[in-house]
Amino acid sequence: MSTALLVMDLQNGVVNGFTDDHGAVLLGRVAKAAAAARDHQISVIYVRLAFRNGTPDISAQNRAFSALIGRGGFGDDDPATQICDAVAPVEGDVVVVKKRVSAFTGSDLDVVLRSMGVTHVVLAGILTSGVVLFTLTDAADMDYTITVLSDGCSDRENEVHRVLCEKVFPARAEVVSVDEWIASLT
């Protein structure tokens, strides 16, 4: 089984929304997971959210993104859409740009994964109730094996994160800590 670590939405405009040191702790854990993945020849794929200039790819009916229409700030080259330096890709990593909450929607992620022979995805990112939940659901429907790094994900609401990781995700995925996942690689 070929595995890939998906590092999702750990971009400046998203991480900067976490005003305390929680964001820095999360970035450190995910950087540790990415380094371990590379050490074990596991592909690391970064997923970031970005839109075309003028946002023609955002519908006014989209409650999550319609506020960006005409305001800008999430264009492909905008600093807000760039991956945080603390977890920046290295040579050989893949970067995928998505247009919606799920890492699969509006991106070529499925094509990349299947081209690489990946059948198992390991999920990390912000928000647990956003990109992690939506990507997990899509990946399960596409028959991928899934692992969620519980402390490699975060949400604005601790209780939402807890319920998803303890009650919802285990029905479709293995849920482990970053350290538990790294230990399973040896």
Image (cartoon, rainbow, N blue to C red):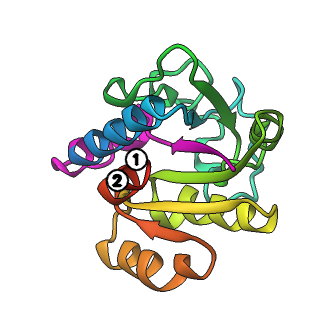
**Which percent across, then down, holds residue 63?**
65, 61
Which of the 4 image quarters holds residue 95?
A: top right
Check residue 12 for magenta coloring.
Answer: yes
Q: Is residue 60 above or below residue 35?
A: below
Q: Indicate the quadrant where residue 61 lies.
A: bottom right
Q: Position of residue 154 (x, y in %)?
A: 36, 59
Q: Quick check: 77 left or right of 61? A: left
Q: Which residue is mark 2?
A: 183
Q: Residue at x 33, y 79 (%)?
A: 159
Query: Mark 1: which secondary structure?
Result: loop
> Mark 1: few, some, or many residues within 10 Å (few <14, many ≥20)?
few
Marks 1, 2: nearer the viewer: 1
Q: Nearer the viewer, residue 18 or 4?
A: 4
**What residue sits right under mark 1 in the picture?**
186
Name the outermost residue toward the top: 91
> Is 92 drawn above or below residue 130 in the view shown?
above
What range is drawn magenta here?
1-24
| Disc 1 to disc 2, C-alpha distance | 6 Å
**Residue located 50% across and 67% down the image:** 129
Q: Is residue 165 magenta?
A: no
The x and y percentages for residue 179 are 30, 54
Name the residue at 83% across, 34% down.
Answer: 115
Bin the neighbour count of mark 2 within 10 Å (Cα to Cα): few under 14, some 14-19, many 20 and up.
few
Label 2: which secondary element: helix
Mark 2: amino acid = Ala
Which quadrant would residue 43 be assigned to in this image? top right
Front in this rendered view, residue 48 or 77? 48
Can the viewer see residue 63 in this picture?
Answer: no
Residues tagged 1 and 2 counted as in contact (Cβ below 8 A): yes
Q: Which amino acid is tagged 1?
A: Thr
Q: Which mark is residue 141?
A: none
Left or right position of 173 against 184: right
